[in-house]
Image (cartoon, grey):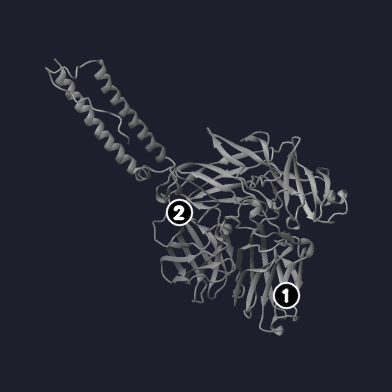
Amino acid sequence: MAKIYNRINWINKPSTATPLNASNLNKLDKGIDDLDNKMVALESEGIAVESTLSQHKPVFSAGTGKDTAGAEQDFRSLVEGQSDVEVEGFTAVNSVKNGDFSNGTVGWTGVYSTISASDNALKVTGNSTSTTPYVVQVAENRFSTKTGEKWFIRASQRVLSADVLNIATTLVSNPSAFVKMVNYPIANQWYDMSGIITIAGDKLATYVQFSCAYADVATSNGKVMEVKDIMAINLDALGMDTLTKEQCDFMYDHHINGLQGVGSGKIVSVGKNLFDWANIVLNESSAAITRIQNGLNVKGLSSGTYRFGYVIFTRLKSNVAYRLRANNVVVRNGEGVISARDFYQNTMSGAISGTSSNNYTLTFICPSDGRVRINFYASGATAALGDVDYFDIQLEEGTTATTYEPYQSSELVYTLPAGMQLHRLPDGIVDTVEEVNNVKMLVKRAKEYVLQASDVIARHQLTEVDYYECMLPTDCTVLGASNTITKQIIVNGMSETIYQAQIPASDIGKFFTYTASGNNNLCIITAKGTYANLAAAQAALAGTKIIYPLAVPVTYIDGDSSGFKCEGGIEVYPNGTIYQEPVTPNESANAKVYVTYNLSDKAVILANSGAITEINKRLIKQNAINLEFDLRLTALEP
């Protein structure tokens, strides 16, 4: 703190050098007032820090984030009560058509193989014509990639037999690049095949390829590889080119179809115990599994070893350690056993078992897809008609034993107007669901639009390319000049470029924008002769999805006639977790969620210990100054 007061240096009578007059007393008065103002300001700074801890993440742990000064804090065990939530839009564009095989095998062709589709997965069966059967997209479903672009590729891939040398996911671009290869894959185990590829050269017909290799042709015959949930996302087109692979795995953790923003959904807050008694789905296998007071009962459907029922968890964190504990197990017959498997029944950890009443504890690492299957057995190695009760079950993050607590949860459900999504443009313009002065509102700053044939108004034929001029809606904000990349428009995964008198062939598949006479125009660049005339281009380009910025944001209030609704609220629990659930995952990107946590008194003290200490020091100094001033005034009294 800068020095703000200069001493008078009083001299006693009979000297008249420092008279007790208005001038000198006002100097003292001003000094005290200045010190008081500094104290108020310092105290206000402490109060501002004490109440906020926040972060942006699509799925995250409660109580970790940045305070108002931007410093990382972790008060996971010290958060409490109701919290403010803001949901931010996000936009993703999957350039792979029918990547979830909801339309069968349409758009895909097998090479040295036959293909079929069921349960949203593609089956690729070797036909004894090559050691490396594979599958690719058909020509009309391929997409353009440009030099320097970063593409995030993700899929799940597995084989159904153990005699496979490797499986591979490849982006066939210029040149081709392996996304990921797995040597000697385990039969029936799904592998997360994801990676970021930086494009080295232009290619108009890039595609993804999935292969498996065998030792010889005879071995490949009739062997099956499966693929599902395929995505190819142009990160540059979305302004996401700085993301790492790990961040992309987090942001794009489920399959989406085409261009999608954030749809209706809910934000869920749960306590440290993730075992949801009310909503958990119980599944019979070789034993009946039913709810009882504070627990589960498992009875074998017949005598025999390893009879079980099971529970599936789908919202756990990838590659994170978890601990499951049944705090009291009653074995009336048979043998109690608990085991953790992945969703496809592959073993993840050793089983915990016992034939007497005791506590069972199991730890495991969650697979990359966030899904875990917990088997509760009525009989282990003992071939008996088992009958076992498991009480006070707790599933929690980490491996350290903690005290049992019942399941707790709260949720905020937001419903958007029909057909609406929350978007984010590359320049950072974003739609939000937020609360202002206790009023929940939706603020749309970007708008989805489907191009109409009548919007395509002109054809321009240059030496190396053609481009087609399209009128944007009148509520679009004024865009930048044609010689700048505005980062304000998203067009079905295309990258943005700038206008040149002679646009080079390397810009085929890109777009640029310009504003003239108050009208905003979008120009889509194609190879020469792609469309025979304007009418052909109008027919082909109609249906193209674009996202553009609104000149004037539109606000919707909770419960108004638009259909926008916000129900419930988020309560934060110590050592809990907050996550989101879209209503229709394939048609919704992950939102970014901003949470302001309430902190307990202990957390406030910890967060502000430095500021509080400084305030106490200043108060002591202030009291000393006041005391000294009182003494001097007393000495000056006649």
- Per the image, the residue denoted by label 1 is 125
- Per the image, the residue denoted by label 2 is 272
Q: Amino acid at mark 2?
A: Lys
Q: Is residue 324 above or below residue 239?
A: below
Front label number (2 vs 1): 1
Q: Amino acid at mark 1?
A: Thr
Q: Verify CB contact (< 8 Å) between mark 2 and mark 1.
A: no
The reply to whether residue 394 is in sight is: no
Position of the C terminus, as image quadrant, is: top left
The one of 292 and 569 positioned closer to us in this rendering? 569
Residue drawn at 73 percent across, 67 percent down? 117
> In the shown orientation, is residue 186 left or right of residue 405?
right
State which quadrant residue 6 falls in.
top left
Element class at badge 1: strand
Coordinates of residue 425 in the picture (x, y in percent): 64, 46
Residue drawn at 45 percent across, 68 percent down? 331
Q: Which mark is residue 366?
A: none
Q: Give the alpha-carbon distance from disc 2 to disc 1, as whole Å.
A: 45 Å
Q: Is residue 348 above or below residue 635?
A: below
Residue drawn at 66 percent across, 52 percent down? 237
Coordinates of residue 92 in the picture (x, y in percent): 65, 52
Coordinates of residue 274 in the picture (x, y in percent): 49, 56
Q: Is residue 386 above or below residue 400?
A: below
The one of 222 and 289 positioned closer to us in this rendering? 222
User: Alpha-carbon neighbours of circle 2 within 10 Å: few (<14), some, or many (≥20)?
Assistant: many
User: Alpha-carbon neighbours of circle 1 within 10 Å: few (<14), some, or many (≥20)?
Assistant: many
Coordinates of residue 119 in the picture (x, y in percent): 70, 64
Position of the N terminus, as image quadrant, is: top left
State which quadrant residue 434 falls in.
top right
The reply to whether residue 65 is in sight is: yes
The one of 193 and 363 positioned closer to us in this rendering? 193
Element class at badge 2: loop
